[in-house]
Amino acid sequence: MARLLDEDFPTDYGGTPMRIRRMAIDSGFNTMAVYDFVRMQQRSRVMAVKGESKVPSVIGLPSLIEIGPQGKRIRYGIRLWPVNTNIAKEELYRWLRGAVPDTTRGEKWPTGFCHFLNTARNISSSYARSSW
């Protein structure tokens, strides 16, 4: 999965290839493997997340989850970000219903527009099998 962070993904409509700006990994399954992976990556690029229905926004405030030898939380350790999956699904479904802009007429891409590669399914399934 670390290779995905440095990969350039072509766009369907031309233009500059895109890179993943920030990767969120669900820590609900194989938690320690996720934490180990996140620990090895740049904090600004990879984050551990966990679904939490009581968070008042899509992404809540992170909690420090690593404990040091003195029993105190490690200040620069892994942070676990709660994600309200109900709100996130509503937003995603709204974005998926968005119309593709006519860039030949100068229309801009709307905020939140979802771009998918034709090979996205192959990429995610091959990395899921080989990552952990």
Image (cartoon, rainbow, N blue to C red):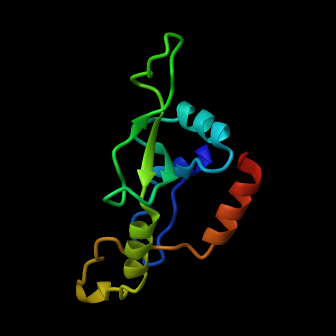
In this orientation, does residue 49 appear? yes
Vertical arrangement, residue 92 with respect to residue 2, above or below? below
Horizontal arrangement in the rendering, residue 92 relative to residue 130 (left or right): left
Horizontal arrangement in the rendering, residue 45 relative to residue 31 (left or right): left
Q: Residue 15 sits in which quadrant?
A: bottom left
In this orientation, does residue 6 appear? no
Q: Nearer the viewer, residue 68 or 129?
A: 68
User: Which residue is found at the position 43% from the left and 79% from the top?
Assistant: 93
Q: Residue 109 sits in which quadrant?
A: bottom left
Vertical arrangement, residue 83 with respect to residue 48, above or below? below
User: Which residue is found at the position 30% from the left and 87% from the top?
Assistant: 104
**Farthest residue toward the right?**
129
Q: Looking at the image, how many numbered discs can be counted on the residues?
A: 0
**Farthest residue toward the top?**
70
Q: Nearer the viewer, residue 123 or 48?
A: 48
The quadrant of the image that shows the C terminus is top right
User: Which residue is found at the position 40% from the left and 86% from the top?
Assistant: 97
